[in-house]
Amino acid sequence: MKEYNLSDRHIISLKEEKLALSTDDLHVWYGTNEAIKGVSLDFEQNKITSLIGPSGCGKSTYLRSLNRMNDEIAGTKITGEVLYEGVDINSPQVDVYEMRKHIGMVFQKPNPFSKSIYENVTFALKQHGEKNKRVLDDIVESSLKQAALWDEVKDSLDKSALALSGGQQQRLCIARAIAMKPDILLLDEPASALDPISTGKVEETLLNLKEHYTIIIVTHNMQQAARISDYTAFFYVGHVIEYDQTSKIFTRPKIKATEDYVSGHFG
């Protein structure tokens, strides 16, 4: 693999009044392995930001840090700040479960519960005390519509979610996440296990969702990043080397490592 000068960086800063989330000098260790090495990024409201880079470079670790999913991994140590509405989400006084209502997540493989479509969407709502059937019905319909799934399942809401296709299951997981009305939606390679048609539907769904949500997505698919994201961050061995508008990253990158990666000449 080529050697790159890791002191070469191009990282834009965004206007503070438009920020949905930011990280300041974020470091993440798994035991003695430092997976994230001082990453500072700003995420603009109602935009899609793609996190790209080679396997093992820290993209997913960073994404999971944005709503404390790394808390589940033994031996994890985090320093620096993840700022949401001016509060560091790693502060001891932060209620993790309350925070995750505002910063939702969808994982790489569709993971619906072995329950009905309706129960999948309402599960977290009921866990948080919502019992009004009319309210639940309205949220199920609005969430499935936002996830572009309503027309396909509206007559079979009592059907098992496991009977849906992979693409439908992933859109159901998106509906389940947005049922909590988060401000931010994190997605870790949400289309990597899907066929091209299902991938297209998920991408179209995300483009429509950014009107209401700030979306941060990890993807290995360069075409996907170019198609749907407003901003792109290029990760390399735990660092962010370049962060800019997606159009610039893919047509006029400032850093050689970024140019090599997006052009397929990396390594």
Image (cartoon, helix red, strand yellow):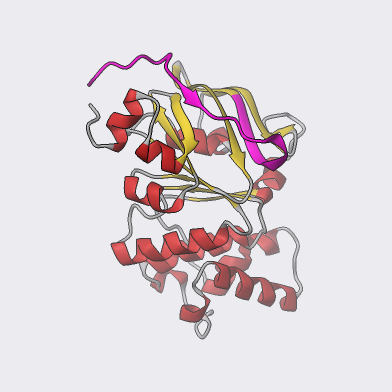
Say which of 153 and 6 sits in front.
6
State the quadrant of the N terminus: top left
Q: Position of residue 247 (x, y in %)?
A: 42, 43
Residue 67 seen in this snapshot = no
Q: Nearer the viewer, residue 54 or 91?
A: 54
> Residue 219 falls in which quadrant of the image?
top left
Question: Relative to 99, does residue 159 appear above or below in the rendering?
Answer: below
Instruction: Give the total number of marks visible in the rendering.
Output: 0
Residue at the image position 56 percent from the left and 71 percent from the top: 144
User: Relative to the observer, which residue lies in front, 151 or 257?
Assistant: 257
Q: Residue at x 66, y 53 (%)?
A: 182
Q: Position of residue 158 (x, y in %)?
A: 53, 80
Q: Which residues are magenta?
A: 1-24
Q: Give the left or right position of residue 245, taking residue 223 as reference.
A: right
In this view of the protein, can residue 88 be seen by the observer? yes
Q: Inspect the magenta stretch and tell me whether residue 204 lies in it.
A: no
Residue found at x 32% / y 31%? 259
| 42 left or right of 7 in image | right
Q: Is residue 15 magenta?
A: yes
Residue 158, above or below 251? below
Measuring from the top left, give residue 44's x and y in whole percent.
61, 42
Q: Position of residue 66 (x, y in %)?
A: 58, 37
Closer to us: 162 or 194: 194
User: On screen, 19 above or below 152?
Assistant: above
In the rendered structure, the answer to whether residue 30 lies left or right of residue 132 reads left
